[in-house]
Amino acid sequence: MNQLRYGVAYYDEYMPYERLDEDIAMMKAAGINTVRIAESTWSTHEPQNGVFDFTSVDRVLDAMHTAGIGVIVGTPTYAVPTWLVKEHPEVLAVTADGPGKYGARQIMDITSPAYLFHSERIIRKLISRVCKHPAVIGYQTDNETKYYGTAGDNVQLRFVKYMREKFGTLDVINERFGLDYWSNRINAWEDFPSVVGTINGSLGAEFARFQRGLVTDFLAWQVSLVNEYKQPGQFVTQNFDFEWRGHSYGVQPSVDHFAAAEAFDIAGVDIYHPSQHELTGTEISFGGDMTRSLKRSNYLVLETQAQAFPNWTPYPGQLRQQAFSHLSSGANMVAYWHWHSIHNSIETYWKGLLSHDFQPNPVYDEAKTIGHDFARLSESLVNLRKENKVAVMVSNEALTALEWFKLPDGRTYNDVVRWLYDALYRMNIECDFIQPSCTELSRYSLIVVPALYAAPDEALERLNEYVRQGGHAVYSFKSGFADDTVKVRTAVQPGVISEACGIRYSLFVTPHEVRLRSEHPEIIVAADDSGNEAWMELITAEDAEVLLHYDHPHWGQYAAVTRNRYGSGTATYIGCMTSRELLSSILKNVLQESGLWGAEQELAFPLIVKTGVNPHNETVRYYFNYSDAPQSFVYPHGVAAELLSGKEIQSGEQVDLEAWGVRIMLEAGS
């Protein structure tokens, strides 16, 4: 990847009339140099069983090559054709809600032999046909792949085999999973029940782990097929996505992204976010940091919004800001879903770069400026290298466990993750993401651990050792409570990490009119701060310093937030869900104690700073104004070229940012 890619998803098959040449002319005018095709049109390419028609693919590849536009070809397996379901109804996933019904996409049983047979055939037919075409730069396997709730009899049988291979005997399973409770004990393998109706969170969480493994295996299988045809210089990627809350939000519950990414040459992602007055850049940053961390490398934004919904149509300047925001987190490509707006079916009002009339519009006109700047600045901005000193530790296992045992007000794992991540983002602390299995903790000066409810002892012991050797850790409540089978530890909580945290607790309550009282001069509780939310652990500090107590007639003796010096490092434990403002005050103190508070942290949201080093060893600093009001700051670094305007900026010079503005500073390499 030696240039920035600016792209769109393009579906010639959906067009209401012939306009390929006109589309390409408009793409060239906008600086589009990449399109993604074919991932959702299986029924067009195989209209009947064994009858193949790749006319639309051929014509698009030929036309794009003539125009100098690269093409990413998708395997069209995430939406099955009608004839396949008619002939093999078992390809539809049987879920906890019963047998699947045809109509939507992503309704398959990804373990079905019939589905896999026909998927392999269409993959081989398509990829063998296109692999040597000079327009093809890479491939996307499937799309936003998940396990789609598949839990039928065939999947249950595979799960029993998985459990037998992993745990060996039923005695071990009964003990590890607590199956004596409510007579759930299994005394013969042939009696192993379907897990769909289980009330046992440990068993349910293990089944979810197994289902995520199905996704990892399915994607690796597709990659192995594509790799048989892939030519030198071509890549294979996947379009990962996140937990969806009307937009991209948190860790994906149905995929272990780290495991699934191993098979790919480069990670790809779709990132959708609130816009207009709600645009903060947080989701762009979160999604980018997560995707970059999967392979510790640059990544592709295969889908993001151009117009989309009426409440997402960007204000003037926002499309530019969003595009450069993706680059600032390490993306080498920004591509829109999609080029044109569709005239019927469910996504009629998820608009593309062009509206339904296919004419130039203000969003398209702004995209032209982005394409021009991407081409002009590619050499300086491509392959941005980021060496972050802060990591956020995330866990699919903890996520699943807390789905079984939510906070009293219904909040989940991703709410805690975003509570902490968003606070760091607003203070201009750039982060990587790591898993509990990570053995290279010493790469980071600070590790933030949200609600690591379920984790093996060895992962927690590594964190203890990380602190002892001089690292700084911040734990939230609900960390260290259960082992990796979601069995609550019998030790005094928070279990293994008590050693580094210097605390203990055995009681936890739902807060009611409980405020917080600071014991530290630099941690400020505002007079109008209503207190803590959702959860509170009643902590006794043994060796730790108390940073905040609960302010309450009955709980006032207990600590809410503590810090312990352990070995050469420190462990901070936050035992309740504070307000955003108080969390920022706590984290600011941690960052200062850790030596991580610098010039960038003197700025704060809506001024966001992102930094990296390009292949020429030049420092690139992006400055964003995520607000409707002009902002200014004093540039604190060495002399730099501002790439968008071409102006030279001196140290100490005031820099002005218009509403939704961006500045890119390039400093000479050492």
Image (cartoon, helix red, strand yellow):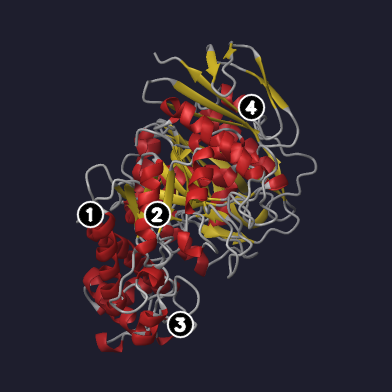
Crowd rating for badge 3 (residues with CA inside 10 Å; few <14, some 14–19, many 20+)? some
Q: Please determine whether, in this image, residue 643 is positioned above or below residue 45.
A: above
Counting residues from the start of the chain, the first of labels 4 and 2 encountered is: 2
> Is 125 left or right of 587, judged from the image as shown?
left
- Spatial CA distance of label 3 from label 4 is 51 Å
Q: What amino acid does circle 4 point to? A: Leu
- Spatial CA distance of label 4 from label 2 is 47 Å
Q: Position of residue 279 (x, y in %)?
A: 66, 45
Q: Position of residue 230 (x, y in %)?
A: 23, 51
Q: Please determine whether, in this image, residue 125 is positioned above or below residue 170.
A: above
- Please name which of the two marks, 4 or 2, marks the residue nearer to the observer: 2
Counting residues from the start of the chain, the first of labels 2 and 1 encountered is: 2
Q: Quadrant of residue 144 in the image?
A: bottom left
- Spatial CA distance of label 2 from label 1 is 23 Å
As rendered, which of 133 and 168 lies closer to the eye? 133
The reply to whether the C-beta atoms of the residues labelled 3 and 4 are less than 8 Å apart is no
- Spatial CA distance of label 2 from label 3 is 34 Å
Label of residue 60 in the image: 2
Counting residues from the start of the chain, the first of labels 3 and 1 encountered is: 3
As rendered, which of 186 and 440 lies closer to the eye? 440
The reply to whether the C-beta atoms of the residues labelled 4 and 2 are less than 8 Å apart is no
Q: Which residue is mark 4?
A: 603
Q: In percent of the image, x 47 and y 59: which residue is there?
A: 11
> Is 348 left or right of 11, judged from the image as shown?
right
Counting residues from the start of the chain, the first of labels 4 and 1 encountered is: 1
Q: Position of residue 290 (x, y in %)?
A: 45, 46
- Spatial CA distance of label 4 from label 1 is 46 Å
Q: Please determine whether, in this image, residue 342 is positioned above or below residue 281.
A: below
Label of residue 227 in the image: 1
Q: Which residue is mark 3?
A: 100
